[in-house]
Amino acid sequence: MTEQEIVRALITVGAVILGFLLGQFSDWQKTKKASSSKERSIKKLISLEIKLNISRVKNYWDKVLDSHETWETDDGGFMYTQLAEAAVKNPLPLLTSNAWKSNLGEIVAVYNETELEKLWDFQNKLERLYSLHSFFADAVNERRETRRFHDATHGSGAGMFISSFSFVGSVNNHAPEFKAIVDELLNFNSNS
């Protein structure tokens, strides 16, 4: 083999190797771009869902707060019993977690640990809000049924008093948490 043939063979092999490497690099870039695009899409969907939920909670909360002129007692406390009643009179809106649930397997790769903890906390607060709202609805219905029973049977005033006292006690134990959760949801910022 002549020197020229060796150079041509080396150039040919070098061109093939370079072509292969460029092809691999191009495939890697396409994969990385597709992955990055998917991550942005997941983040955008979850962000939009959070904004929608916050907007719905805000509209709900505004209705609850507008149902009374003031929420302060004469001694500066908060009227938690009335809050529970107003919360039940206003139906809790549909709060979604579809984007969160449908991407649950992939969000670990999309968000860092701090962001994941914030998102997890947000979702848990939504679930707790529903749970407390349901508790208030049950308590209000139970008090209503107790009143009907006492009215129908001409029951003692003591029974009504005990029932009302029980209602106030159970509601006052949970209404501050309900209010705190709403406040936290309305002030949620996934970026902080």
Image: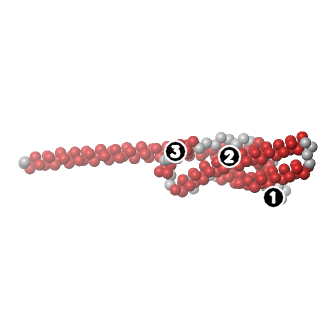
Mark nearer the N terminus (3 vs 2): 3
Marks 1/2: CA–CA distance: 28 Å
Q: Position of residue 52 (x, y in %)?
A: 61, 43
Mark nearer the N terminus (1 vs 3): 1
Q: Nearer the viewer, mark 1 or mark 3?
A: 3
The three-letter code of the residue at mark 1 reads Gly
Question: Residue at point 66% right, 50% down?
Answer: 128
Q: Which mark is residue 76?
A: 1
Marks 1/3: CA–CA distance: 45 Å
The three-letter code of the residue at mark 3 reads Asn
Question: Residue at point 46% right, 44% down?
Answer: 38
The three-letter code of the residue at mark 2 reads Tyr
**Can the viewer see residue 82?**
yes
Q: Which mark is residue 103?
A: 3
Q: Check disc 3 and report its element: helix, strand or loop.
A: loop
Return the residue nearer the eye: 30 or 132: 132
Marks 3/2: CA–CA distance: 22 Å
**Can the viewer see residue 65?**
no
Q: Check disc 1 and report its element: helix, strand or loop.
A: loop
Q: Which mark is residue 130?
A: 2
Q: Residues within 10 Å of mark 1 (few under 14, many from 20)?
A: few
Q: Is residue 156 left or right of residue 97?
A: right
